[in-house]
């Protein structure tokens, strides 16, 4: 019995600590209102919406494009930091640094190619992710009614192909 009392005391001590209360501000009760309060006031849980349709959780709906983009960003960051040790982006040294990286540094060409192909794949994943979000209407219901003007603004923001002034100060999400 003393072990159980000790565990209860430990649980109360942790639950009453300032760190725990700052991370988890609401008690969990199985009502929609309390679930909403718990998710929106939590540091980690607020990144996702409170409710999701069941079909939105399938891999065929999301294709894990957000996670792949984040993973490729991490690859870019790590390989970029490692390449900073060997490469100087100055015209006088750039060619020699690339040759040194290719022939003198062990796995140097693999590191360079991993950085290069990671950048290409990251751009492709970002574009596909934004296209999926746009086509599935994941950003809001009213934006889908704006039609081709929303599509042209989306292209200008994503691809930087069209000038960013095509919206003329209006919010393309709300159509105002």
Image (cartoon, helix red, strand yellow):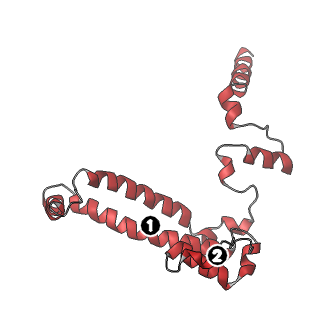
Tell me if residue 165 comes above or below residue 35 in the rendering: below
Q: Residue at x 22, y 58 (%)?
A: 108
Q: Residue at x 64, y 76 (%)?
A: 167
Tell me if residue 149 comes above or below residue 1 in the rendering: below
Separation of residues labelled 2 and 1 (CA atoms) = 30 Å
Residue 168, disc: 2
Specify the quadrant of the image occupied by residue 34.
top right
Of mark 2 and mark 1, the one earlier in the sequence is 1
141 sits to left or right of 48: right
Q: What element carries label 2?
A: loop
- Residue 42 image point, x, y percent: 70, 43
Q: What element carries label 1?
A: helix
65 sits to left or right of 92: right
Residue 46, disc: none
State how many labels appear: 2
- Residue 55 image point, x, y percent: 71, 69
Name the foreground residue: 57 vs 86.
Answer: 86
- Quadrant in which the C terminus appears: bottom right
Badge 1 density bin: few <14, some 14–19, many ≥20, Cα 10 Å: many
26 sits to left or right of 91: right
Q: Which residue is drawn at 58% across and 76% down?
A: 165
Badge 2 density bin: few <14, some 14–19, many ≥20, Cα 10 Å: few
- Residue 21 image point, x, y percent: 71, 31
- Quadrant in which the N terminus appears: top right
Please name the residue that numbered disc 1 is placed on.
Answer: 122
């Amino acid at each position: 019995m003393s072990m159980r009392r000790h565990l209860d005391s430990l649980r109360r001590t942790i639950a009453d600590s300032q760190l725990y209360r700052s991370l988890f501000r609401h008690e969990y009760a199985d009502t929609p209102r309390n679930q909403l309060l718990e998710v929106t006031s939590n540091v980690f849980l607020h990144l996702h919406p409170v409710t999701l349709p069941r079909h939105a959780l399938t891999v065929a709906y999301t294709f894990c494009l957000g996670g792949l983009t984040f993973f490729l960003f991490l690859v870019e960051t790590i390989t970029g930091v490692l390449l900073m040790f060997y490469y100087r982006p100055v015209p006088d040294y750039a060619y020699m640094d690339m040759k040194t990286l290719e022939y003198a540094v062990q796995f140097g060409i693999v590191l360079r190619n991993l950085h290069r192909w990671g950048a290409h794949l990251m751009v492709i994943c970002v574009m596909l992710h934004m296209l999926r979000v746009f086509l599935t209407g994941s950003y809001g219901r009213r934006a889908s009614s704006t039609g081709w003007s929303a599509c042209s603004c989306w292209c200008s923001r994503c691809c930087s192909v069209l000038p960013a002034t095509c919206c003329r100060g209006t919010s393309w999400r709300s159509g105002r």
